[in-house]
Amino acid sequence: MNSDDILLLGLKRTVSAISKLDGRSLWDTTLPGGFAGYDFVTVLSDGQRVFAHTEGKLFCLDLANGRILWSNDLPGYGYGIASLCFPGGAAAPDPTAVQKRFLQQQQSSASAAGG
């Protein structure tokens, strides 16, 4: 399958490849970890590999089948949402989109409190 025909989804310690053509699941890979309920997965692909970060760990998966190729515990970095990017490329998640969403949430909270 052409990498341009794949949508990658990161959620609840799982990375999934979904066909953009018909919506069927191509593969699902649950990333090893220990925190139940931590669900944010940052995902970035170079067209051959998928890089995913969750629970303070970085993983590299094969785009064709979801097999984990390597992982890095990133000692000393702690936990939280990570931004991934390639030099000269776009970041995931997009910082502008994250900021916009944060501002929308603040506005919604202010409207609900005042209204």
Image (spheres, rainbow, N blue to C red):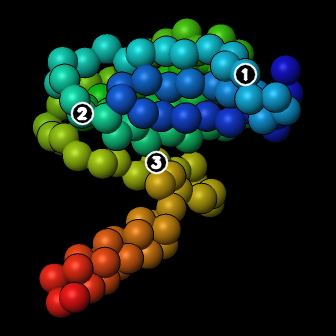
**Front one among 65 and 40:** 40
Residue 32 figure quarter: top left
Instruction: Tell me the residue that label 1 is attached to.
Output: 24
Q: Is residue 99 visible?
A: no
**Front one among 27 and 59:** 27
Q: Residue at x 19, y 23 (%)?
A: 36
The amino acid type, in three-letter code, at marker 1 is Arg
Horizontal and vertical percent for residue 26?
69, 16
Q: How far apart are labels 1 and 3 at the CA level?
A: 26 Å
Instruction: Tell me the residue that label 3 is attached to.
Output: 84
Horizontal and vertical percent for residue 47?
72, 33
The residue tagged with tag 3: helix, strand or loop? strand
Q: Residue at x 62, y 14 (%)?
A: 27
Q: Residue at x 50, y 39 (%)?
A: 43
**Position of the C terminus by quadrant:** bottom left
The residue tagged with tag 2: helix, strand or loop? loop
97 up-or-down from 51: above or below? below
Q: Nearer the viewer, mark 1 or mark 2?
A: 1
Residue 99 figure quarter: bottom left
**Position of the N terminus by quadrant:** top right
Instruction: Tell me the residue that label 2 is attached to.
Output: 38
Q: How far apart are labels 3 and 2 at the CA level?
A: 18 Å
Q: Is residue 100 visible?
A: yes
The amino acid type, in three-letter code, at marker 2 is Tyr
Q: Earlier in the sequence, mark 3 or mark 2?
A: 2
